[in-house]
C-alpha cells in the first residue's frame, strides 16, 4: 500500500514529511539515549532481513494469488518501537530509490502508514497490552492478529485519506474505503498469523532475542481470560449503547451523502445492485439494525440495542466457530502427517 | 525457473546496479543532485490534476541526466514498469468517474482521461528522477550527502548497514526460494506454514550474523560511531548544475520563460 507521488499533492506530502520527521527525530533521540551499540549492526541487518523476507512469496489460501509480509510489527517486537520506526524508514527510502515503490514526495506519508502506525499505535497499544510478560502461545497469537489487523486497517485508512485530501484521483472516499479496508482485513489476519508463528518459534529457540524488548518490561498484565472478556464487553457496549447514537445520528459517510445529495442513502439504479439489495432485505436477520415492527421511538431504540448486541454475539460466535474449525483441521493434518 | 526466484533475481539485478563513476553525472556532488531532485519532484507534484502540456518541459531534467550519465533507456524503463502498477490502478478510475470536459488549446477533451494522462506523466517524471539519482550516484556518496545535509548519524549508520547487507540477504532469499521450488510440487510447499518456517530460519541466521558483525566491530574498537573517509568537495560545476536547474524549474512553474 505504498502511496505514489503521482497521486499526492505537495500539501499532503509536506504534512506527511513534517509529521514523520518529528516522530523519527524523537525516535533517534530515544535510540541515542539508550546507547546500545549492538543495535547499530542489528538494526541494519534486520532492515536487510525485512527487505529479503518481502521478496519471498507465499500462496494465499483460496485465492490463487500470492503475497508477502510487511514485517513492521515483527520489527517493533524485536527492536522496540523507536528502532523499528527508523529501520522501516530506511527500508521505505531504499524501496523508493531503488524500486520507485512509493515516491520521494510520498515518503513521509508512507512512513506514517507503514511505519509509525504499526510501531506507535498497534505495537504499544494493542500488542503489548495483550501479549504482556512471559506470554504463552495463545496470548502471542491473539496479540499479533489483533495488532496486525488494527495496524493495517489504520494504515489502509490513512492511504485513503491522503489520496482523498490530495484530490488527484477521482475515486470517491466511500468507494476507495470500501476497496481498501476489506482487502487489508485478510492481509492483516495473515500478517498477524505469520508474525505470531515466527515469534512463537523464536521464543522456543532463542528466547533471549525477545527478552530484550517484550520481556524486559516488568509490568503485570491481565490474564488472557480477562482480555477476552474485555473484548466481549467492548463489543457489547459498542453494539448496545453506541448503536443508539449511531441510529439517531447517521454515520459520517451517510451524513456526507445527505448533505451533498439531500438523501441519506444513494439510490441504486443498477439492476444487479437492486436485486442484491432485495436479496439482502429478505435474508437480513435485523434489517437496518431494528425490529421490523418498531413503531414508537422507545421500541426502536430497544430494537437497535438488541440488534447491536445480537450482531456482536453472532460475530463472536462465527469467530469462535472459525477458530474451532481451524484447530480441528490442524489436528487432522497432524494426525495424517504422523501416520 | 521458479517465478518467485525470477522476481528475486530481478530485484538483485536492480540492487546490484553498477554506477559508472567516470561519467559527468557521477562526478557531480551528491548534495547538488539530492537538492535538485527534491525541488524537481516537489514542483512536478504541485501542478493541478489536469496538467499535461505544462509538465512536458520537465522531461528535460531526466533526459539531461540520461545523457550525461550514459544511462540506457531500456534499463530505466525496465525499472519503471513494475513500479507503475499502483499509480495506474488508482488512476484508471478517473476516466470512468470524471464525466467533465477540459479545454486544452481550444480542443475539448474528457477530463478523466486528461487527469489519468497527467498521473502517468507525474509518475514517469518522479520515478525517473529517483532512479536516475540512484543510477548516477553510489549509495555511500548518497549517505555522505545526507550526513552533510544534517541527517542524524543513527539514520546514516542504518542506511550504511542496510546497503552492505541487503544484497547478501536478498541472495539468501533467492537460494531459499530455489530450494523451496526444488522441494515443492504443484502448489504444495508454497503455503503459509512452510513460509513461516523458512522466514524464522532466515531471521535466526540474520540475528546470528548481526551478533558476529557486532563482535568483529567491537574487537576493532567500535564505540558507536562509524568512521568514514572521502569527504565531499563542492565545485563550481555543482553550483552551476544546482542553480541552472532550480532556475529552470521555477521559470517553467511560474511561466517566466514566455514573459521575457
Image: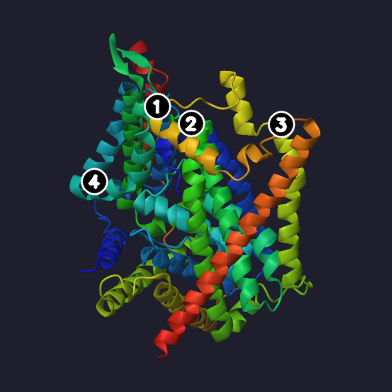
Where is residue B1, by image quadrant? bottom left
**Which element type, helix, strand or loop, lies under badge 2?**
loop
> Could you classify mark 3 by the number of other residues whose Cα lies within 10 Å: few (under 14), some (14-19), or many (20 or more)?
few
Spot the residue most to the bottom.
Answer: A339
The chain holding disc 2 is: A
The chain holding disc 1 is: B
What residue lies at 43% left-to-right and 30% top-to-bottom? B43
Which one is in front, A27 or B236?
A: A27
The chain holding disc 4 is: B
**To which residue does mark 2 refer?**
A172
For residue A291, above or below residue A221: above
The label nearer to you, 3 versus 1, is: 3
Say whether disc 2 or disc 3 marks the residue closer to the N-terminus: 2
C-alpha separation, residue under disc 1 versus residue under disc 4 = 29 Å
Residue B72 horizontal side relative to residue B117, left or right: left
**To which residue does mark 4 refer?**
B77
The label nearer to you, 1 versus 4, is: 1
Q: Are marks 2 and 3 in contact (CB under 8 Å)?
A: no
Q: Are marks 2 and 4 in contact (CB under 8 Å)?
A: no
**To which residue does mark 1 refer?**
B97
Q: Are marks 3 and 1 in contact (CB under 8 Å)?
A: no
Say whether disc 1 or disc 4 marks the residue closer to the N-terminus: 4
What residue lies at 52% left-to-right and 68% top-to-bottom? A193
C-alpha separation, residue under disc 3 versus residue under disc 1 = 29 Å
Residue A250 horizontal side relative to residue A98, left or right: right
Marks 2 and 4: same chain? no
C-alpha separation, residue under disc 2 versus residue under disc 4 = 31 Å
The chain holding disc 3 is: A
C-alpha separation, residue under disc 3 versus residue under disc 4 = 52 Å
> Could you classify mark 2 by the number of other residues whose Cα lies within 10 Å: few (under 14), some (14-19), or many (20 or more)?
some
Q: Are marks 1 and 2 in contact (CB under 8 Å)?
A: yes
> Could you classify mark 4 by the number of other residues whose Cα lies within 10 Å: few (under 14), some (14-19), or many (20 or more)?
few
Amino acid at each position: 500500500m505504498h502511496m505514489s507521488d503521482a497521486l499526492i499533492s505537495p500539501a499532503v506530502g509536506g504534512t506527511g514529511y513534517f509529521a514523520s520527521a518529528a516522530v523519527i527525530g524523537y525516535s533517534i533521540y530515544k535510540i541515542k539515549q539508550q546507547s546500545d551499540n549492538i543495535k547499530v549492526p542489528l538494526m541494519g541487518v534486520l532492515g536487510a532481513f525485512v527487505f529479503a523476507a518481502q521478496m519471498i512469496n507465499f500462496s494465499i489460501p483460496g485465492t490463487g494469488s500470492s503475497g508477502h509480509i510487511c514485517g513492521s510489527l515483527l520489527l517493533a517486537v524485536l527492536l522496540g518501537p523507536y528502532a523499528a520506526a527508523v529501520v522501516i524508514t530506511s527500508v521505505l527510502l531504499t524501496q523508493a530509490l531503488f524500486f520507485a515503490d512509493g515516491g520521494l514526495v510520498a515518503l513521509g506519508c508512507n512512513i506514517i502508514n507503514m511505519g509509525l502506525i504499526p510501531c506507535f499505535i498497534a505495537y504499544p497499544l494493542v500488542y503489548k497490552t495483550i501479549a504482556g510478560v512471559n506470554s504463552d502461545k495463545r496470548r502471542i497469537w491473539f496479540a499479533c492478529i489483533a495488532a496486525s489487523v488494527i495496524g493495517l486497517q489504520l494504515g489502509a485508512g490513512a492511504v485513503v485519506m491522503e489520496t482523498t485530501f490530495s484530490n488527484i484521483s477521482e475515486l470517491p472516499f466511500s468507494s476507495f474505503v470500501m476497496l481498501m479496508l476489506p482487502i487489508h482485513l485478510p492481509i492483516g489476519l495473515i500478517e498477524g498469523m505469520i508474525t505470531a508463528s515466527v515469534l512463537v518459534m523464536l521464543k522456543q529457540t532463542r528466547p533471549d532475542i525477545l527478552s530484550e524488548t517484550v520481556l524486559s518490561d516488568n509490568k503485570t498484565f491481565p490474564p488472557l481470560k480477562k482480555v477476552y472478556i474485555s473484548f466481549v464487553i467492548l463489543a457489547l457496549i459498542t453494539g448496545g449503547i453506541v448503536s443508539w447514537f449511531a441510529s439517531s445520528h447517521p454515520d459520517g459517510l451517510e451524513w456526507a451523502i445527505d448533505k451533498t445529495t439531500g438523501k441519506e442513502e444513494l439510490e441504486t439504479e443498477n439492476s444487479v445492485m437492486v436485486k442484491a439489495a432485495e436479496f439482502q432485505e429478505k435474508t437480513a436477520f435485523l434489517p437496518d439494525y431494528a425490529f421490523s415492527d418498531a413503531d414508537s421511538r422507545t421500541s426502536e431504540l430497544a430494537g437497535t440495542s438488541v440488534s447491536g448486541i445480537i450482531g456482536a454475539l453472532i460475530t463472536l460466535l462465527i469467530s469462535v466457530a472459525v477458530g474451532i474449525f481451524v484447530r480441528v483441521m490442524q489436528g487432522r493434518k497432524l494426525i495424517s502427517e504422523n501416520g | 525457473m521458479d517465478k518467485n526466484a525470477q522476481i528475486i533475481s530481478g530485484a538483485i539485478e536492480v540492487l546490484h546496479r553498477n554506477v559508472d563513476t567516470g561519467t559527468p553525472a557521477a562526478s557531480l556532488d551528491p548534495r547538488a543532485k539530492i537538492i535538485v531532485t527534491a525541488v524537481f519532484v516537489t514542483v512536478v507534484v504541485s501542478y493541478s490534476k489536469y496538467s499535461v502540456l505544462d509538465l512536458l518541459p520537465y522531461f528535460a531534467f531526466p533526459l539531461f541526466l540520461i545523457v550525461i550519465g550514459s544511462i540506457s533507456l531500456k534499463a530505466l524503463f525496465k525499472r519503471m514498469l513494475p513500479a507503475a502498477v499502483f499509480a495506474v490502478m488508482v488512476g484508471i478510475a478517473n476516466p470512468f468517474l470524471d464525466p467533465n470536459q477540459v479545454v486544452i488549446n481550444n480542443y475539448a477533451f474528457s477530463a478523466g482521461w486528461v487527469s489519468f494522462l497527467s498521473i502517468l506523466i507525474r509518475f514517469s517524471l518522479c520515478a525517473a528522477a529517483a532512479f536516475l539519482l540512484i543510477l548516477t550516484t553510489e549509495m555511500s556518496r548518497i549517505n555522505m550527502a545526507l550526513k552533510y545535509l544534517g541527517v542524524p548519524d543513527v539514520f546514516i549508520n542504518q542506511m550504511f548497514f542496510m546497503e552492505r547487507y541487503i544484497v547478501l540477504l536478498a541472495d539468501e532469499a533467492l537460494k531459499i526460494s530455489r530450494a523451496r521450488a526444488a522441494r515443492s510440487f504443484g502448489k504444495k510447499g508454497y503455503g503459509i506454514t512452510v513460509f513461516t518456517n523458512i522466514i524464522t530460519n532466515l531471521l535466526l541466521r540474520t540475528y546470528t550474523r548481526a551478533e558476529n558483525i557486532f563482535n568483529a566491530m567491537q574487537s576493532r574498537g567500535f564505540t558507536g560511531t562509524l568512521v568514514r573517509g572521502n569527504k565531499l568537495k563542492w565545485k563550481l560545476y555543482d553550483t552551476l548544475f544546482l542553480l541552472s536547474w532550480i532556475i529552470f524549474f521555477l521559470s517553467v512553474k511560474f511561466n517566466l520563460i514566455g514573459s521575457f
